[in-house]
Image (tube, rainbow, N blue to C red):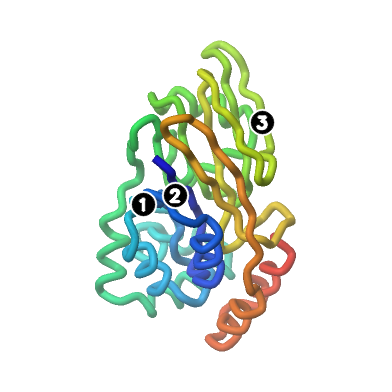
Amino acid sequence: MRVLVISDVHSNLTALQAVLDDAGEVDITWSLGDIVGYGPEPNECIQTLQSRPHVAVAGNHDWGVLGKLDLADFNEDARIANLWNREQLTFESLAYLQALPEKRIEGVCTLTHGSPRHPIWEYVISTSVADANFAYFDTPICLVGHTHVPILFRQAAEDMASQAIYLPEFQPVQLDDARYIINPGGVGQPRDGDPRAAYLLLDTEELIIEHRRVAYDIAATQAKMRAVGLPRRNISRLEVGW
């Protein structure tokens, strides 16, 4: 099965559409949370995912707009954007987000937003955090988002420390019998210094992954954000990938 793995769309429809077009034909899309927040088109992003075969899990911004997390725990720009997103969401969009689970098992993969240990909030940003999380899922692979940075953590054996491996672009990577925590990077707001939208293709039979980047019309998204008065910092960071 050919799977498109995405995370952190953040209401950026232009970036999402660029990823869908670039990925081509897939059997299913797996979304790792934070469909909404920051950007200008939350309903349109949800509807675009709903129009195609997909499964999804909840992220912290999805919970933030629902009131399931206290927005006082978010930085000011994220809080303002989430309040605006909340006001835009239709009843149907709110119901969709409300129904998202914190974690899913799909074949050999566990899907979650933050980490298998703390699915909504924890950032897997180092080998020490990755090592602590391998005990919290049973599948060979765990797919996470939240950091907006594409990376792979590989644990060769249970008693060994994991390796952090930055994913090469447009190069298929064969997974072996080790265990993995893999982050596809962010679609709508990359944070690794590359403003292009990031995503992952996964062949679930051959266990081959491919990390991809695609340019999108950042200026168009920025114009939409300015038009509705979203925070300037969130607008400007798109063009620098941070």
Per the image, label 2 sits on a secondary structure element best described as loop
Counting other residues with Cα less than 10 Å from the Cα at mark 1, is it few (<14), some (14-19), or many (20 or more)? many
**Percent x, y for residue 36?**
45, 65
**Percent x, y for residue 52?**
34, 60
> Dots 1 and 3: beta carbons under 8 Å?
no
> Seen in the image, is 61 located left or right of residue 215?
left
Residue at which label 1 appears:
56
Per the image, label 1 sits on a secondary structure element best described as strand
Query: Residue type at mark 3?
Result: Ala
Q: Quadrant of the N terminus?
A: top left
Comparing 36 with 69, the one in front is 36
Q: Which mark is residue 87?
A: none
Residue lying at 54% horizontally and 21% vertically, measured from the top left: 176
Per the image, label 3 sits on a secondary structure element best described as strand
Query: Residue type at mark 1?
Result: Ala
Comparing 185 with 1, the one in front is 1
Mark 3 and mark 2: Cα distance apart in space: 20 Å
> Dots 2 and 1: beta carbons under 8 Å?
yes
Q: Quadrant of the C terminus?
A: bottom right
**Percent x, y for residue 188?**
56, 63
Mark 1 and mark 3: Cα distance apart in space: 25 Å
Counting other residues with Cα less than 10 Å from the Cα at mark 3, is it few (<14), some (14-19), or many (20 or more)? some
Of label 2 and label 1, which has the lower sequence position?
2
Residue at which label 2 appears:
32
Residue at which label 3 appears:
164
Residue lying at 34% horizontally and 53% vertically, measured from the top left: 54
Of label 1 and label 3, which has the lower sequence position?
1
Query: Residue type at mark 2?
Result: Leu
